[in-house]
Image: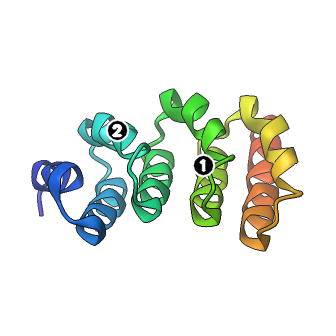
Amino acid sequence: MSADELMATLKDGGGMARARAASELGQLGDRRAVGALHAALEDKNPTVRSNAAFALGELGDVTAVARLITLLGDEDQWVRKSTAKALGLLRAREAVAELERALDDSSEQVRRNARRSLEQIRESSR
């Protein structure tokens, strides 16, 4: 699918189709998808939110950092995991305090990704 088709699916498709579209948009690397992915961070489906968060990290969208930091408090552990991972990809120094708090998350996946992201951020600061 083209980026335009994926963005249309992300907006109007079924739950799994939206989740797949968010993931594929990150892999395509087409920055035109940033707006659609920002909107998908509000999706009712946690898999869509999770994939959109990670896709924004893959696209290097530093404008998403503030919103991603708030998603570290999402009710869904997979959203929190993908968000932590995306913040590391973005080398988001402003997320360090929240990522450190995520080291105490109830989910091992979240804790592992928060640790990895903190390492990425610290390495980029050297």
Q: How many marks?
A: 2
From the image, state whether disc 2 or disc 1 is nearer to you.
2
Query: Which residue is nearer to you in this view: 31 or 113?
Result: 113
CB atoms of marks 2 and 1 within 8 Å? no
Query: Which residue is nearer to you in this view: 69 or 88?
Result: 69
Image location of residue 47, percent across then percent down? 44, 65
The picture quadrant where one finds residue 75 is bottom right
Q: Is residue 93 visible?
A: yes
The type of residue carrying mark 2 is: Ala
Residue plotted at (49% across, 27% down): 63
Q: Is residue 57 above or below residue 103?
A: above
Q: Tell me which label, 2 or 1, sits earlier in the chain.
A: 2
Q: Which residue is mark 1?
A: 89
Tell me the quadrant of the picture where the N terminus can be found. Answer: bottom left
Q: Is residue 16 above or below residue 101?
A: below
Mark 2 residue element: helix
Tell me the quadrant of the picture where the C terminus can be found. Answer: top right
Mark 1 residue element: helix
Q: Which residue is mark 2?
A: 39
